[in-house]
Image (tube, rainbow, N blue to C red):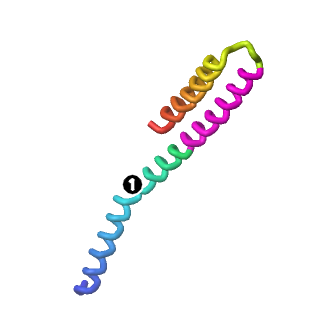
């Protein structure tokens, strides 16, 4: 085996080894990004649900305005907790 072939073999081995080390990091970052997006979608849906909850509460006239605001806060907090469960 001459020097050129030996050098090419070493370079190929190093490039394969580095690719194998980098691949798990890339896939982890992709998975983490997907989890963040999913958590964000849940929080956004929770915000919309909170708006609907408050509108229904105010239309019903059985609760006061502060009670309706509290219902909205609770709805948003539930969505945040679900988002945290996905993310972490």
Quadrant of the snapshot with the N terminus: bottom left
| Quadrant where the image shows the C terminus | top left
Q: Secondary structure at mark 1?
A: helix
Vertical position of residue 11 compared to residue 57: above or below: below
Q: Start and end of the magenta stretch?
A: 38-59
- In this rendering, the answer to whether 65 lies above or below 52 is above
Is residue 47 part of the magenta span, yes or no?
yes
Q: Quadrant of residue 55?
A: top right
Which residue is nearer to you in this view: 46 or 65?
Answer: 65
Camera-side residue of 61 and 80: 61
Q: Nearer the viewer, residue 74 or 66?
A: 66
**Spot occupied by residue 16 in the image (x, y as percentages of width and height):** 35, 67
Q: Residue at x 72, y 22 (%)?
A: 58
- Name the residue furthest front: 65
| Mark 1, residue position | 25
Give the overall secondary structure of the magenta segment.
helix
| Picture quadrant where residue 18 is located | bottom left
Left or right of 8 on screen, residue 71: right
Mark 1, other Cα within 10 Å: few <14 / some 14–19 / many ≥20: few
- Image location (x, y in percent) of residue 77: 54, 27
From the viewer's side, name the closer residue of 31 and 69: 69
Residue 86 x, y percent position in the rendering: 51, 36
| 62 sits left or right of 18 in the view | right
Outermost residue to the left: 3
């Amino acid at each position: 085996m001459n020097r050129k072939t030996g050098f090419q073999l070493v370079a190929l081995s190093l490039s394969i080894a580095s690719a194998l080390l980098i691949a798990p990091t890339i896939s982890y970052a992709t998975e983490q990004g997907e989890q963040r997006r999913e958590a964000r979608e849940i929080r956004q849906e929770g915000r919309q649900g909170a708006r609907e909850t408050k509108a229904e509460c105010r239309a019903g006239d059985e609760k006061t305005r502060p009670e309706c605001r509290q219902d909205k806060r609770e709805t948003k907090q539930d969505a945040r907790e679900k988002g945290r469960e996905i993310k972490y």
